[in-house]
């Protein structure tokens, strides 16, 4: 990978948690399944002629649980080609039959074919025609240079989930103008036509490409610039600031090509016929400019994460809940290494955010152990502050919700304690069997491997 792409990759990694919050709020239709790209072994690559395979996960017998977590989303956006990339896509339809967005995938797979450069230029011209048409009618579309080789992804986000049938009607009506827009083939659309029992299709998230040394660039709309594509921090800022538009209306009996584009506070929008309004011949678009960051503005001041914006502080009557850091939020094996902190345990971030809706969270750790024994009072306090700041930075980086951190050997007073090694014993509620169950739990924890 070129050095410039390494730099861009670091910027996507730096913003991965912020992007995960955004994607969870704006793009996730269902959390029980997702699409994933897996790298093939050299032998498999030789047999298939491909370097990857695309699949829907998990396997059917393991579905039914929320597995699309903030951590999974963040790992996608932080993926680097030489560091076990975990690239995923999101399904276009929820289990309730609604969609938060529509997507159009304009491909240019055969890069070595005669006329590939001309096809790439026509792909861009068609993509820009649709980008302008959506923008002129009240939407804030996102157009990505997805591959760096003439492939483009167009996303349109809705302010609220819309019936998938209505979203399909809109995106399909737009895509059927591909010939008038001089494309060589009809693009793939998301969602597909809804069918009972179908998962519908999944669309790859922006970020690192699964085969090309390329990170998504975003069309700025400033065509007078020598390079109107945004990348890295500039592209991410524009993504996070996109304004979702009104959902398309349900067509009566779904008969006819007329759909409604745009609208908002000033009115319901305009009834249009996409085959007429979206088929206008676009202005000539030159070849995609070379990768350059000259047009990108300087990175802005850091913004607060979604978790920080939504964090709730103590109010009247709110209980306090104490969470153990090790074994609950982060793998306990890291605790044995002293100050090392790995990735959060899957689901831990969401757990703290849900809990923070009704309680003040105190995160407890005894990582200091006896390390400061024998030190002066001032040195011990300085050591505690240093480790506390390191833990606080890790919690904030990953988007945890909490009120404070407690580092005393004894746990703070709280209405409830969440501890992977805690044993519940409630004989006043459960009678004598509570002691038997507590004894069995202690034996499990204290036995071999406990």
Image (cartoon, rainbow, N blue to C red):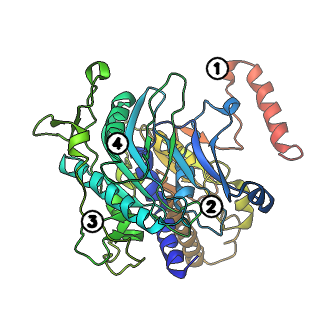
Of residue 277 and residue 204, the one placed in the foreground of this image is 277
3 or 2: mark nearer the eye: 3
Q: Residue furthest right?
A: 448
Q: Do the residues labelled 1 and 3 touch (CB within 8 Å)?
A: no
The residue to which callout 3 is attached is: 284
* Above-or-below relation of 374 to 419: below
Mark linked to residue 85: 2
Residue 429 is labelled as 1
Name which of mark 2 and mark 4 comes first in the sequence. Answer: 2
Write the residue at 24% across / 70% down: 223
Image coordinates of residue 206 in percent, x first then y, are 46, 57
**Of pointers 1 and 4, the one earlier in the residue sequence:** 4
* C-alpha distance separating marks 1 and 3: 76 Å
Q: Do the residues bearing badges 2 and 1 touch, measured as CB atoms within 8 Å?
A: no
Instruction: Please state, as top left, top right, bottom left or bottom right, where the N terminus lies in the image.
Output: bottom right
| Among the 4 quarters of the image, the one containing residue 213 | bottom right
Q: Disc 2 vs disc 4: which is toward the camera?
A: 2
Is 28 drawn above or below residue 309 in the view shown?
above
Separation (CA) of disc 2 from disc 4: 42 Å
In this view, the residue in front, 26 or 400, is 26
């Amino acid at each position: 990978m070129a050095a410039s792409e390494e730099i861009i990759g670091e910027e996507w990694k730096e913003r991965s948690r912020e992007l995960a919050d955004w994607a969870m709020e704006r793009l996730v239709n269902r959390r029980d399944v997702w699409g994933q790209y897996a790298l093939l072994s050299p032998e498999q690559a030789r047999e298939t002629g491909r370097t990857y395979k695309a699949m829907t996960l998990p396997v059917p017998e393991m579905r039914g649980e929320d597995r699309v977590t903030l951590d999974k989303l963040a790992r996608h956006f932080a993926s680097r080609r030489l560091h076990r990339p975990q690239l995923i896509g999101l399904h276009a339809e929820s289990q309730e039959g609604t969609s938060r967005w529509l997507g159009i995938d304009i491909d240019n797979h055969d890069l070595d074919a005669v006329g590939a450069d001309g096809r790439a230029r026509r792909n861009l011209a068609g993509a820009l025609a649709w980008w302008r048409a959506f923008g002129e009618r009240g939407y804030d579309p996102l157009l990505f240079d997805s591959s760096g080789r003439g492939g483009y992804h167009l996303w349109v986000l809705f302010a609220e989930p819309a019936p998938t049938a209505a979203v399909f009607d809109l995106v399909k009506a737009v895509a059927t103008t591909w010939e008038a827009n001089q494309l060589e083939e009809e693009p793939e659309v998301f969602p597909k036509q809804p069918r009972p029992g179908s998962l519908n299709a999944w669309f790859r998230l922006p970020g690192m490409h699964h085969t090309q040394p390329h990170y998504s660039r975003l069309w700025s709309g400033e065509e007078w610039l020598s390079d109107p594509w945004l990348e890295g921090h500039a592209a991410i800022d524009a993504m996070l600031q996109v304004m979702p538009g009104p959902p398309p209306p349900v067509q009566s009996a779904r008969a006819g090509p007329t759909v409604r584009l745009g609208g908002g506070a000033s009115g319901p929008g305009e009834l249009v016929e996409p085959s007429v309004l979206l088929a206008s011949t676009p202005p000539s678009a030159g070849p995609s400019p070379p990768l350059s960051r000259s047009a990108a503005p300087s990175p802005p001041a850091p913004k607060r994460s979604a978790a920080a914006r939504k964090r709730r502080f103590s109010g009247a009557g709110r209980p306090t809940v104490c969470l153990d850091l090790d074994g609950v939020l982060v793998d306990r094996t890291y605790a044995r290494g002293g100050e090392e902190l790995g990735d959060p345990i899957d689901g831990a971030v969401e757990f703290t955010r849900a809990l923070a809706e009704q309680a003040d969270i105190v995160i407890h750790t005894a990582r200091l152990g006896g390390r400061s024994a024998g030190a002066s009072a001032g040195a011990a306090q300085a050591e505690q502050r240093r480790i506390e700041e390191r833990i606080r930075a890790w919690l904030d980086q990953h988007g945890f919700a909490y009120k404070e951190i407690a580092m005393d050997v004894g746990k703070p007073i709280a209405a409830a304690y969440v501890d992977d090694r805690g044993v519940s014993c409630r004989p006043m509620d459960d009678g004598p069997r509570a002691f038997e169950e507590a004894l069995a739990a202690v034996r499990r924890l204290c036995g071999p491997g406990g």
